[in-house]
Image: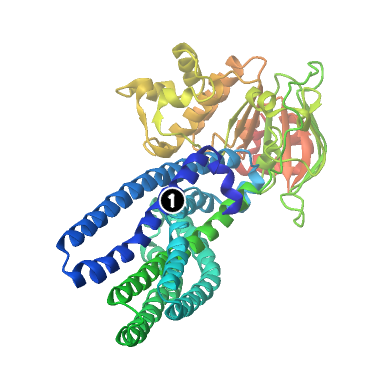
Amino acid sequence: MFKLRRFLTDYKKECIIGPLCKLFEAILELFVPLVMANIIDVGIKNGDAGYVWRMGGLLVLLAVLGWSSAMFTQYFASKASQGAGTKIRRALFAHINTLSHAELDRLGTPSLITRITNDTNAVQQAIAMMIRLLTRAPFIIGGSLVMAMTINLKLSLIFFAAAVLIALTLYLVMTRSVPIFSAMQKKLDRIARIARENLSGNRVIRAFSKQKTECARVDEATEDLAKTSIRVSRLSALLSPVTYAVTDIAIIAIVWFGAIDVSLGGMHTGDIVALVSYMTQILLAMIVVANLVTLMTRASASAKRINEVFETEPGVKETTKNPIEIDKTAPQIEFDNVSFTYSDDGDEELSDISFSVRRGQTVGIIGGTGSGKSTLARLIPRFYDVTKGAVRVDGRDVRDYPFSQLRPQMGIVPQQSVLFSGTIRDNLRWQDKNATEEEMITALKIAQAYEFVEKLPQGLDSRVEQGGKNFSGGQRQRLCIARALVKHPQILILDDSFSALDLATDAALRKALRENTHGMTVIMITQRSATVKSADLILVMNDGRLAGQGTHEQLFAGCEIYRDICLSQQTETEAAQ
């Protein structure tokens, strides 16, 4: 929690005035038992009705002032906690967007969502409770002990004994609760992951009739969370009964020994009432502290998870923010003995890859599943850093570029077609907010998407549901290709972006790309030999290595792996053409 204090810098006033108001309310509460004692020992004992009314009016005044002070505290606590929570969410989201793919893969999407929502809410609630109660409860306990000492020093020892026993109980519960709360948050991550998989893969689950299996999986995860919650709840549940038991025993002792003193003339009846009131105030304060401890232990676990994200450094960092000079005469893309692995202790995904691509060339990357095609393409926009060698764009190592200069010159269509909720127009303007309707229509025509978009009742303003679920797989792919084309990228990377297209649409799209992307370097990753057949350069990947490079004719004649791929999809006559 202490590491997150920076998010409260803009709320110093609220964090100071709020506790002070609560402190003022606590001071007023400490005077109430004394006023009650005077009413009993002076007003009632002497039959002075006027004194009773005056003291009663004072009690009402104390109550009104205390209520007003509490309202101010509530306002300041809400303002500070809500503001800090908003800042934490913004900072978390901004930091997550600086992380490279490697860190995102390690942390996991469900866990990051839980940290932004559930964990931040726990911290936000803890901030509000700290402002409202952190100063009040200790002051009430300490103040009650002092006031008890002014009334009767011997009986105040009972207060000290009760306070020590309750504090010991709080400490024991807190030290055992923190690890369990941390485990609970991890179990919440697991439930979020399973829920995400089930909701996104609902069609697959139904297709395989696996509803019962998935329900059992969810039941197991929720039962596991429930057991952990029950375990920590049992620990927390000890606080109230132990606190009540200790306090009740202390009250009995006060009344017992106090009555003896009253009978001996050492105390007044009102003093006993005041001591019992102070003991009750300690009880209530301790209950508040108990609840606050439970809340703080959970918030502490959540804060630790939030700080883990903030302390995660991006593996891919910018070396400069300033644009660098490029060499237009150099190859537009060059791989120089590139090797890459996803983890330090893992096997190499790519080994000794070397090739160069001239400006305006169409490059096809083909190979079997898991051969490293997509991994190779992800190194060009520097989603990952190479382990060995260098990737160059326009003669400069991609590690020398600021992201604002490197990535905007690329249009990327990933394997999984991702559309964002909104309209088709919103999605097409994702990169260029000022794109004209003519530019969007041109991009749609090249991507072979204009035909079905034109038939929609609202055209470009047609609604896109989350993830583009209201469009078919082929339609989503074509819209994603159109979105990449709108900004006129210098390098267009199509990562298996034709997989959901029929052969006729595939051919029409490739023809449109050749005719309308002059000067644009196009990289097509695919498993279809027909898709890369007309490419200027074909790269054949096999088990992370470059098995061959050249034109279709050269590779068909000299690369056995490429020849086998072609013959597995076409007849020898068709493949040789």
In the image, what residue occupies the spot 46% across and 65% down?
294
Q: Mark 1 points at which residue?
A: 128
Looking at the image, residue 67 sits to the left or right of residue 558; the answer is: left
Looking at the image, residue 36 sits to the left or right of residue 558; the answer is: left
> In front here: 157 or 87?
157
> In front here: 491 or 532?
491
> In front here: 9 or 541?
9
Which amino acid type is shown beneath numbered disc 1?
Ala
> In front here: 147 or 310?
147
Label 1 residue SS: helix
Q: Position of residue 303 (x, y in %)?
A: 55, 54
On screen, residue 513 above or below 291: above
On screen, residue 141 above or below 258: above
Q: For the residue carrying disc 1, how many other residues have a C-alpha within 10 Å: few (<14), some (14-19), or many (20+)?
A: many
The quarter in which the C terminus is drawn is: top right
On screen, residue 462 above or below 419: above
